[in-house]
Amino acid sequence: MMKAVFVFCVTIFTLFSFKTKEKITVYLIGDSTLSIKAVNTYPEMGWGVPFAWFFNSEVKVDNKAMNGRSSSSFDKENRWQPIVDSLKSGDYVLIQFGHNDEVETKKTYTNPTEYVNFLTKYVKETRSNEAYPVLITPVARRAFDENGKVIDTHKVYAQLVRDLARKLNVPLIDLSSKSMELLQDLGLEKSKFLYNHLAPNQNPNYPEGKRDDTHFNELGARMIAELVLKEINVLQLPLSNYIVAPKKKN
């Protein structure tokens, strides 16, 4: 009898000892600039796609961003509540809206007050589940003035995010500023190589060509993802411990 109890206890101990560690989930919420794309839109790519490649096996990146969504429509379409229901302690929510919020002619337009209110909702409900919110200013569009200087097309809404991050003491990734710096360094012509610019018949998905200064191609998505990853390291978020460092050449 004692032997049977001993074997049972050892078995239970072993099962608990080898229990698989639950992964940290990093949720991405936002618009088309970071979302996963349909195959027939390639080479257009959101920065959230290559972002997921830079983490070790202890992290799962769940990209919930969706084309055309604003901070308000994302919630009203019930895309947020399932995330809240799935959040666990130690998870992350990276929040980047603005492209569709700020355009008054779109159905997704969200005025500045509403924009702040929805971002606040995402932050507070993330924290209420013992997860970590990170606010991200909207990534830059490719726009230059006649003197070759990058134009800040998100000036008002990006500042709202910065102000809210300070008010709520939330980690901020100022992707608007960082991506504008990148575009300025590349200049008017070279910056085209980051966006979905295609000549006619260059790609079967765009037989008539494409000139898109909002959405990235593979190279652009990768470079923007690297900006986000770098800022995660700069902020010294615990998440940075799971970023895979590039292998050093001998």
Image (cartoon, rainbow, N blue to C red):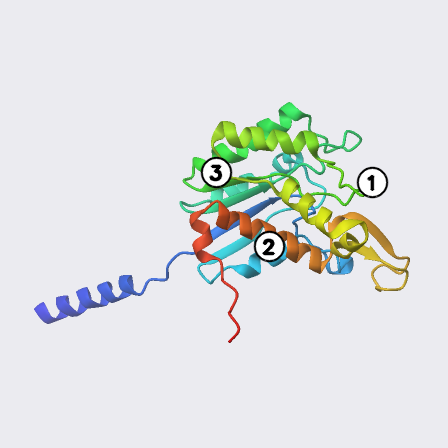
Residue type at mark 1 is Asn
State the SS at label 1: loop
Q: Are marks 2 and 3 in contact (CB under 8 Å)?
A: no
In front of the other: label 1 or label 3? Answer: 1
To which residue does mark 3 refer?
Answer: 126
Q: Are marks 1 and 3 in contact (CB under 8 Å)?
A: no
Left or right of 190 in this view: 28: left
Between marks 1 and 2, how big is the CA–CA gap? 28 Å
Residue type at mark 2 is Glu
Q: Residue at x 31, y 65 (%)?
A: 18
State the SS at label 3: helix
Q: Residues within 10 Å of mark 1 (few under 14, many from 20)?
A: few
State the SS at label 2: helix
In front of the other: label 2 or label 3? Answer: 2
Nearest to the observer: residue 17 or residue 208: 208
Dot placed on the residue nearer the N-terminal end, 1 or 3: 3
Between marks 2 and 3, how big is the CA–CA gap? 24 Å
Q: Which mark is residue 226?
A: 2
Residue 203 percent coordinates (x, y)? 83, 64
Q: Are marks 1 and 2 in contact (CB under 8 Å)?
A: no
Residue type at mark 3 is Thr
Residue 96 percent coordinates (x, y)? 61, 41
The reply to whether residue 1 is visible in this rendering is no
Q: Residue furthest left?
A: 2
Q: Residues within 10 Å of mark 3 (few under 14, many from 20)?
A: many
Q: Residue at x 14, y 70 (%)?
A: 4
Q: Residue at x 70, y 55 (%)?
A: 220
Nearest to the observer: residue 99 or residue 41: 99
To which residue does mark 1 refer?
Answer: 147
Nearest to the observer: residue 168 or residue 19: 168
Residue 77 percent coordinates (x, y)? 64, 38
